[in-house]
Amino acid sequence: MEKLRYFNREELLKVDEAVKVSEELVNNYFKMSSGQWLKNRYEIKTAKDLVLHEVVDGPFAQVIKYEGRKKDVSLGSSSFSLYKVCLQDNAILSIVEKMALLIEPFLLYILIHELVHVVRFSKFKQRYENKNEADVTLEEERKVHQLTYDILKSVPVFGLKQVFEFYKDWLPIPGS
């Protein structure tokens, strides 16, 4: 069995930067106010902070929905959805190495893709049913890839063209 790899300190800084940029791009694309954006309760974690059932083999990330509740409140009406974006360091590092992709644009694409899922779940554009990424319908995945492409297509990020090429079977890229 292959030993799992985790992001190193330098890669974690790149993840952090990609999170900031992806949040801003997704927020701007969906034209959400800061109040609306904060209502989308989510957290982004890398593999070192995941529990066993959040680690999957295959996808680069997945979104898991949890039910949160304020402390000292027992009523169900006080519960809220918390979405956890679980980055799969090993899968990301392996494909970056195998396909000679730059990690920054690849992380940006993955994070935007997962945040689009979170927005769609929270706005009830797509129902969340305790499914992993592999179980999401192909139609929904195509929509999310299209939205991810729409968000990123005019953003000047070095290496993004290669990421679009990697996802070409999911994207309607002109001239491909």
Image (tube, helix red, strand yellow):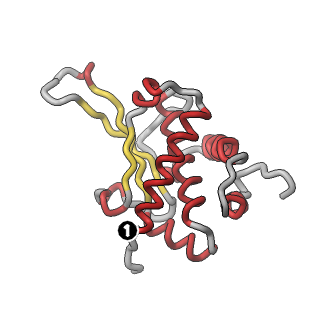
Q: Residues within 10 Å of mark 1 (few under 14, many from 20)?
A: few
Q: Is residue 90 left or right of residue 31?
A: left
Image location (x, y in percent) of residue 12: 41, 62
Q: Is residue 150 left or right of residue 80?
A: right
The residue under the point 50% across, 63% down is 58
Residue 162's image quarter? bottom right
Question: Which residue is nearer to you in this view: 19 or 111?
Answer: 19
Question: Which residue is nearer to you in this view: 10 or 166?
Answer: 10
Residue 158's image quarter? bottom right
Image location (x, y in percent) of residue 50: 32, 57
Residue type at mark 1: give it: Arg
Residue 148's image quarter? top right
Q: Residue furthest right?
A: 175
Q: Is residue 128 left or right of residue 112?
A: left
Which quarter of the image is occupied by the N terminus? bottom left
| Number of marks present in the image shown | 1
The residue under the point 42% across, 48% down is 85
The residue under the point 59% across, 76% down is 98
The residue under the point 35% across, 32% down is 81
Q: Is residue 113 above or below residue 88?
A: above
Image location (x, y in percent) of residue 59: 51, 59
Q: Is residue 159 above or below residue 22?
A: below
Q: Is residue 79 above or below residue 137?
A: above
Residue bearing the label numbered 1 = 9
Which quarter of the image is occupied by the C terminus? bottom right
| Label 1 residue SS | helix
Q: Is residue 127 left or right of residue 142?
A: left
